[in-house]
Amino acid sequence: MRNTWKLKYEDHSIHVENTMLSDKLYVDGVLQDEHIGLHLSSRLYGKLKNNRGEWEDIKISLSAKCPNTECRIFIGERLIYSTGLQWNM
């Protein structure tokens, strides 16, 4: 099973791919982090330059929850996306 999440942040595109054997984080089409192997949860890390020219950290938290995988995306200390919030809408 493959899960993908795509979102825009300022002028950047963030793309997260999750399969049974790997997780990948792409920013503007460039692979920034990858976790390979069978796992129930993982963290991916990256960086992007914001509109003010400052570098911001990206943290992706993935966890397997039956029957779906949860994805949370943080920029700096802010949660900007969560599948948990998506289901509650």
Image (tube, helix red, strand yellow):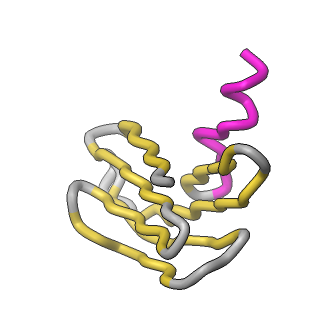
- In the figure, 49 relative to 44: above or below? above
- In the figure, 26 relative to 66: above or below? below
Q: Is residue 60 left or right of residue 17?
A: right
- 29 or 80, which lies in front? 29
Quadrant housing the C terminus: top right
Q: Quadrant of residue 62?
A: bottom right
Question: How many marks can you see?
Answer: 0
- 16 or 77, which lies in front? 16
Task: Verify whether residue 34 appears in magenta.
Answer: no
- The outermost residue toward the top is 89
Q: Is residue 89 left or right of residue 4?
A: right
Q: Quadrant of residue 24?
A: bottom left
Q: Position of residue 6 (x, y in %)?
A: 39, 41
Q: Which stretch did the figure color magenta?
A: 77-89
- In the figure, 34 relative to 28: above or below? below
Q: Position of residue 48 (x, y in %)?
A: 36, 61
Residue beneath the point at 29% across and 71% down: 31
- The outermost residue toward the left is 29
Residue beneath the point at 72% across and 58% down: 64
Residue beneath the point at 58% across and 51% down: 73
Q: Position of residue 58 (x, y in %)?
A: 51, 62
- 82 or 65, which lies in front? 65
Residue beneath the point at 68% across and 48% down: 70
- The outermost residue toward the bottom is 37
- 1 or 27, which lies in front? 1
Q: Position of residue 4 (x, y in %)?
A: 44, 47
